[in-house]
Image (cartoon, grey):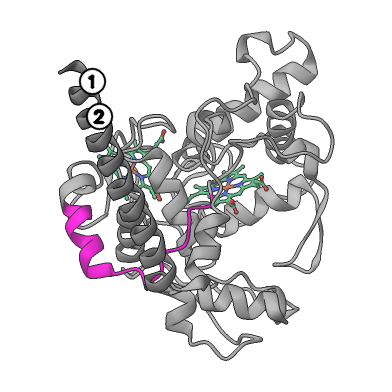
Amino acid sequence: MREGEDVLIRAIRLTVWSVSLCLALMVGLLMVIVVPPQSRAIYDQRILPESNSNWMAPDSTAIPETPEGDLIRYGRELVAHTSVYLGPSGTIRPLSNGMNCQNCHLKAGKKTWGNNYAAVAATYPKFRARSGSVETVERRVNDCLERSLNGEALESGSRELSAFVAYIQWVGKDVPNQTTPEGSGIVDLPLLPVAANPQIGEVTYQRRCARCHGQDGAGVKKDAEEWLYPPLWGPESFNTAAGLYRLSRMAGFVKMNMPNDVGADSVQLSDEEAWNVAAFINTQPRPQKFFSGDWPDLSTKPFDYPFGPYADAFTETQHKLGPFAPIVSAKAKR
Ligand code: HEC
Ligand code: HEC
């Protein structure tokens, strides 16, 4: 009797195993047939966001009580409350749009995947394709002032520019030269196999973002100088030459940081939602600014740079919203 039962159980197990194996093989085969090889390659290359970044921002209370320390502290203050000093009614010189650096470089540029400054000290001065030249940290700060803060550059040698640089260098001081720690800057999301869709993104926007940034994306003021919730488009937002105007930068920033209380281990949006909401935001009106010296070598334009001319035959619309995989692989073949 026991013997018979055993045989029966073994027979059932064998059947279950073979059926599962067949199913797995069929699914595998289907993937190979259905998913085009291009997008498979892109998905394989995805950088997996890690919440346990090996980078730890230094502790601000450890900034030394020296003149150099004072400059670093002033720099941190300028990053966190830029508008108070350099905004439309700034006490030092009105030269920017009222946003703070910290609105985009979260926690004064110290948050993992929060567009932080971890890699700056270790990698600048560096060659940047946008200008086709070697850029200093000073130059990079001024880039954000002119583009992300839709304003003007600070004079080199000014106490403010020196303070920005001193603080940013201090944030990345423990990072080994020429390295970029995991979790620095903005994450690169896997590319979607299709174009990002602003209409679908708008639904996500109204459900997940409008309660803070407003239905019209215009933001909410905290007081006369600063934003409680900064504007995402409209006259007081960043201009079309800013980094966030590239879809991959906006999508990566939003995925890892928005709504405002999420981090790498508590993301709330799928990659697809992040791309689509980014597409909605970046198809709304905002200040236009063009720099004639940008991208002297057209072939170095990023796949998602939304303004032609290009070194390839893809349209501006495809460079703006995707699908990006064909652009990336065409470039790789060149
Ligand atoms: C509207 C958003 C926004 C604001 C405001 C902003 N930035 Fe940026 N900043 C960016 C983006 C986007 C990048 C590029 C990130 C990337 O390409 O991955 C960037 C890059 C930088 C970098 C280079 C980082 C690196 O690792 O190469 C520095 C330095 C910087 N910003 C400083 C500043 C300073 C200082 C301010 C305030 C005066 C400021 N930014 C304001 C969005 C912003
Ligand atoms: C709970 C409120 C809240 C929600 C919800 C929220 N945000 Fe934000 N967002 C903020 C705050 C606050 C900042 C500025 C952070 C700072 O200054 O420390 C910000 C900054 C940003 C920025 C960079 C600054 C700028 O103005 O361009 C972008 C882009 C952004 N949010 C997009 C989104 C998107 C997209 C969603 C919906 C998926 C969203 N946010 C949901 C509060 C929110």
Residue furthest bottom as drawn = 313
Kindly identify the amino acid type of the residue bearing the numbered disc 2: Val
Q: Amino acid at mark 1?
A: Glu
Give the magenta range.
188-206
Q: Residue 128: x and y, percent? A: 75, 61
Tell me whether the residue at label 2 lies in contact with that at label 1, contact meaning CB atoms closer than 8 angstroms: yes
Residue 69 is inside the magenta segment: no
Is residue 60 among what the camera can see?
yes
Q: Quadrant of the N terminus?
A: top left
Could you say whether the residue bearing mark 2 is in a helix, strand or loop?
helix
Task: Identify whether 70 is placed above or below 12.
Answer: above
Q: For the residue labelled by badge 1, is the local secondary structure a helix, a strand or a loop?
A: helix
- Residue 192 placement: quadrant: bottom left
Query: Pointer 2: residues within 10 angstroms few (<14), some, or many (20+)?
Result: few
Please tell me whether residue 50 is drawn above or below residue 214 in the rendered image.
above
| Residue receiving disc 2 | 7
Residue at image location 53% in from the left, 37% down from the top? 85
Please state which of residues 106 and 97 is positioned toward the viewer in this rendering.
Answer: 106
- Left or right: where does residue 247 sit relative to residue 268? right
Residue neighbourhood size for the residue with mark 1, other residues' Cα within 10 Å, grouped as few (<14), some (14–19), many (≥20): few
Q: Which mark is residue 3?
A: 1
